[in-house]
Image (cartoon, grey):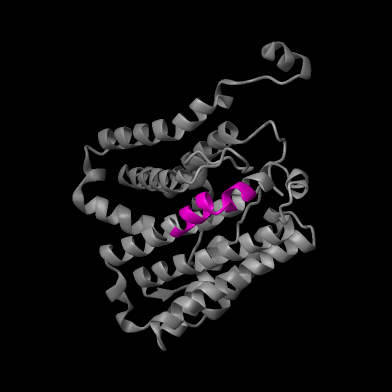
Amino acid sequence: MEAKAKIKTGEQSSFFDNPNVRTAMPFIGFVIICVLFMILTNGRIFAAANIKLLLSQTYMLLIACSGVFMVMTMGGLDFSQGSMLGVASIAICYLSNINIVLAIIGGVVTGGIIGLVNGYFNVKRKITSFIVTICNMFLLRGICAYLTTKSPVYAVSDIAKYNTIEFNLTFTVVILLVLFIAFNYTGLGNRLKAIGAGETAARYAGIRVDRTKILIYVLAGCVTGLAAFINSVKVGSVTSTAGNQLETQIMIALVLGGMPVNGGAKVKFYNIILGAFTYRILASGLVMMGLTSQMQQLLLGIIFLIEVAVFSDRKTGMIVK
């Protein structure tokens, strides 16, 4: 009867719409990529030195992904993250010469203000999220270039003392744990999924959609400010290229982790962790194989396109809001 009903209403179920298949595919993809590059690099990709390098490159991506994850869950997109990280890193480097705690607060506040601008224009001015954030991406990139025209902005000389595995790992795990608890145990995740599935229905369910969306954009900005601190600790200075292509890396990572581009009920928090590590192993493997940057971008683009086609929720018909 159910199959007949689907035929009558014109709905066609596909292999990828099976929830078990959708859940398993990102994990299967992760295993395939690990095995593939282990073979292609003769195991060098998982050597101790490369594992350490891989982790050092993943901390910032994990934190940045977690903020965008919240935005995407409610059906939005954020392409301003890379430029936002650059501007927040400048604030952190400036303020680190006064006090390191003040620097962290400054980075978080800077990201939060930019997130508030994104949220205001998306919610109050009714401009689609990807248009707002792309405009902000160019604006912030210009600010970053202007502030670093004469020379890079340097952090306090001893900021590198925080660039240790213990500090970076603890910092990242604490942020992810706080967001995991908030997403799964406070009702926040359910509200965001409801908004992603349909704003009108969410409003009828009593969810304050506009306020929630603005708060999430602010939260995503604050989280990017924390990612900027990890970036500043690692690099020690900021140039005009800080955060370049980070938004692309975040999008590819989340989709590789099985995240639907249009958010909704099928979103899982593990999409962040699984996607970030899958992307990093994939990117590192392509570098170790000696491929040119153009070929790497081409392959990543093809993979991203395939993943979007697989994991977008075709039943809703709504991609971004």
Most foreground residue, 108 or 307: 108
| Magenta-highlighted residues | 178-192
Most foreground residue, 193 or 299: 193
Place residue 259 in its image quadrant.
Answer: top right
| Prevailing SS of the magenta stretch | helix
What residue is shown at x 54% (from left), y 80% (from top)? 147
What residue is shown at x 70% (from left), y 60% (from top)? 132
Relative vertical location of residue 242 with respect to residue 92 in this rendering, above or below: above
Image location (x, y in percent) of residue 196: 66, 45
Place residue 139 in its image quadrant.
Answer: bottom right
Relative vertical location of residue 234 with respect to residue 250 in this rendering, above or below: below
- Quadrant of the frame with the N terminus: top right
Q: Is residue 182 a member of the stretch shown in magenta? A: yes
Q: Is residue 34 visible?
A: yes
Q: How many marks?
A: 0
What residue is shown at x 31% (from left), y 55% (from top)? 55
Image location (x, y in percent) of residue 206: 74, 51
Q: Is residue 63 a member of the stretch shown in magenta? A: no
Image location (x, y in percent) of residue 103: 45, 80
**138 on left or right of 299:** right
